[in-house]
Image: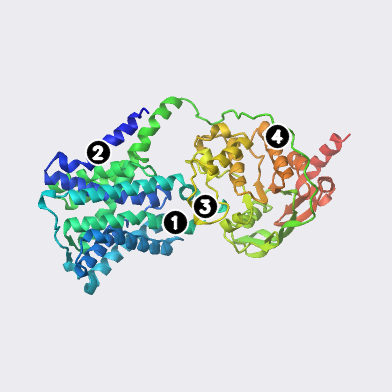
């Protein structure tokens, strides 16, 4: 088998790092590589919560210190090699990280960053003042290594190499699973992720634990290497900044970006310390580097380099935007079965106000099982707000929502998705940096840890996603980033995305809006085919010929409440609907068209 140059380069670099102490006996360079390994492990852990999940943490250095303290404290009381405590240090760090996740799961953006900084200083404060456990500011001196001095730093070095390899394997595995797809969905659009079954609090809690596991272990080895652990050295903000810089420089969300960044940042740090005296100079250097990274390499080195061929190839073009959709000929859909008469969705007295505006005011209607029910009305009548209330992305002020006899208005969006509710949005909300296939793999039909570990890149989940992309006509674009697809193509991928949930009720918000007539026809055909297969639809749409040719029954909203309901023929003749929505011109056109 012929290896690619990329694979060969990785192998060579891995071999150099692994056997570096054999290449030189210079302790300065050995120390630099050991510190680079520590920061690489820390940045790889941070990549899970920041690169994959999108939450920037400036408290990652705290878990290094926690791991070091666990190892140091236990080494004082039990006369065994400190290496014995390395796994336990990782478990304790992961547990503390998950506790932090519980505290911060409602925080986003700058508030989350501030909380992580506060957490770092809080841990430092505890380590300084809990003198009976940590010996306070005096620190803890660890036992000296008892191996043959001829081994030098080899045990520390190899232990960190193994931990780095394990952390990269974990990161690689997470990125391939439905768990990893869900984390990236949270990063791209957390509210949308909830509507496709992604339980964000649980996902983030697990991500916190995974991000700190090997960092705590690396901290234990690092503390033993230093043979001294103290609050100031272990919980300094500069360590966390260096970890964040390593991740940003190498490339967030990439596998080897954190490693590359760490092996660049640590030598820079060493030069700043040795040549310029460290201190404020180091702060200035890191601050300037962070600004330059944001301005010149916002995506990091590896993503920028990886994107060069594509940019050269598409220079002067619009990429995939507006690309022609290849639609295979499909047989006409079978006739839909007669509705059973059972009510699948019931909305009772739904209400929602925004300040003094009552967007939804006592809205009540039903959706029969097996039907394609239309929800129409003038702009501002509350249609999309009703959808948001049904889907759970918005909390109502009053009323009830029942799905198949179960009240769901008090449930979070992911629980509604698990019960069989799927929805699209008026403006498509795909996860733009994920491929079309990954977008379709990301939804979770029901929550279980077994579901989270399913392979999302190959196997049954990917095969199912490919089948659904083929069904909507987007199979040829499976590996293209969703953000490069045209608007109409994105609507089709979004439909495939919610079909993974195998929903009983599908909410479509303007499925024909903003797309060309060919795709409108395709969308209508897909809806009929799915309906014939047993799916129930509730759709909002302003394209009246599309609605009247597809939907039965139709509900009409006006001023936040249901004004009328009936068959397409009844709705067109209802004077209240003509006055509130259709208008006299529409009635005249319909009359002339019928002559």
Question: Which circle, 3 or 1, is nearer the viewer?
Answer: 3
Q: Identify the residue at horizontal 73%, vertical 32% (top origin).
A: 331
Identify the image quadrant of residue 136: bottom left
According to the picture, the residue beneath numbered tag 1 turns out to be 204
Q: Earlier in the sequence, mark 4 or mark 2?
A: 2
Q: Residue 9 versus residue 64: which sits nearer the camera?
A: 9
**Looking at this view, is 39 or 564 the one in front?**
39
**Mark nearer the viewer, 3 or 4:** 3
Assign the C terminus to one quadrant of the image: top right
Q: Is residue 466 left or right of residue 32?
A: right
Task: Please indicate, yes or no, whether residue 548 appears anywhere in the rendered image.
Answer: yes
Evaluate if marks 4 and 1 touch, with contact meaning CB atoms under 8 Å apart.
Answer: no
Q: For mark 3, what is the residue? A: 451
**Distance in Å between CA atoms under marks 4 and 2:** 57 Å
Mark 3 → mark 1, Cα distance in angstroms: 16 Å
Q: Which residue is mark 2?
A: 15
Q: Of the residues tagged 4 and 1, which is closer to the observer?
A: 1
| Image quadrant in which the N terminus is located | top left
**Kind of element beneath mark 3:** helix
């Amino acid at each position: 088998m012929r290896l690619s140059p990329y694979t060969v380069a990785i192998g060579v670099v891995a071999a150099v790092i692994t056997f570096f102490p054999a290449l030189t006996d210079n302790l300065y360079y050995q120390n630099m590589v050991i510190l680079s390994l520590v920061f690489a492990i820390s940045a790889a852990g941070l990549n899970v919560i920041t690169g994959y999940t999108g939450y920037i943490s400036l408290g990652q250095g705290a878990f290094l210190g926690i791991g070091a303290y666990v190892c140091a404290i236990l080494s004082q009381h039990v006369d065994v090699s400190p290496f014995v405590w390395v796994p336990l240090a990782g478990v304790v760090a992961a547990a503390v990280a998950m506790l932090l996740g519980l505290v911060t799961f409602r925080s986003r953006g700058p508030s989350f960053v501030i909380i992580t900084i506060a957490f770092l200083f809080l841990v430092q404060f505890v380590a300084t003042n809990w003198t009976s456990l940590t010996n306070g500011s005096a620190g803890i001196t660890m036992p000296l290594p008892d191996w043959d001095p001829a081994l030098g730093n080899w045990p520390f070095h190899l232990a960190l190499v193994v931990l780095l390899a394990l952390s990269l394997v974990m990161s690689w595995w997470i990125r391939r699973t439905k768990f990893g797809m869900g984390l990236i969905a949270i990063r791209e659009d957390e509210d949308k992720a909830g509507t496709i079954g992604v339980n964000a609090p649980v996902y983030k809690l697990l991500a916190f634990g995974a991000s700190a596991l090997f960092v705590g272990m690396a901290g234990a080895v690092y503390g033993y290497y230093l043979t001294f652990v103290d609050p100031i050295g272990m919980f300094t903000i500069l360590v966390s900044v260096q970890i964040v810089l390593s991740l940003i420089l190498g490339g967030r969300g990439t596998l080897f970006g954190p490693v590359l960044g760490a092996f660049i940042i640590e030598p820079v740090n060493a030069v700043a310390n040795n040549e310029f005296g460290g201190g404020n100079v180091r702060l200035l250097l890191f601050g300037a580097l962070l600004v330059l990274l944001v301005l010149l390499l916002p995506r990091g080195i590896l993503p920028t380099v990886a994107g060069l061929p594509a940019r050269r190839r598409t220079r002067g073009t619009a990429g995939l935007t507006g690309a022609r959709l290849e639609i295979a000929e499909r047989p006409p859909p079978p006739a839909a079965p007669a509705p059973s008469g059972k009510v699948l969705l019931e909305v009772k007295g739904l209400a929602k106000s925004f300040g003094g505006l009552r967007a939804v005011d006592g809205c009540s209607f039903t959706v029969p099982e097996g039907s394609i029910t239309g929800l129409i009305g003038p702009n501002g009548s509350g249609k999309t707000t009703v959808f948001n209330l049904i889907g759970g992305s918005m909390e109502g002020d009053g009323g009830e929502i029942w799905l198949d006899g179960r009240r769901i208005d008090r449930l979070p969006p992911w629980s509604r998705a698990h019960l069989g509710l799927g929805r699209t949005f008026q403006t498509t909300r795909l996860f733009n940096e994920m491929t079309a296939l990954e977008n379709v793999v990301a939804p979770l039909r029901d929550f279980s840890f077994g579901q989270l570990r399913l392979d999302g890149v190959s196997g049954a989940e990917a095969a199912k996603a490919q089948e659904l992309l083929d069904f909507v006509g987007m199979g040829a674009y499976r590996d293209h980033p969703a953000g490069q697809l045209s608007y109409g193509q994105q609507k089709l991928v979004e439909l495939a995305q919610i079909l993974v949930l195998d929903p009983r009720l599908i909410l479509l918000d303007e499925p024909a809006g903003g797309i060309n007539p060919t795709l409108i026809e395709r969308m209508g055909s897909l809806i009929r085919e799915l309906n014939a297969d047993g799916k129930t639809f509730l759709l909002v749409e302003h394209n009246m010929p599309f609605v009247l040719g597809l939907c039965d029954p139709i509900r009409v909203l006006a001023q936040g409440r249901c004004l009328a309901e009936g068959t397409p023929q009844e709705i067109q003749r209802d004077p209240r609907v003509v006055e509130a929505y259709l208008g006299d011109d529409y009635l005249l056109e319909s009359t002339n068209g019928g002559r």
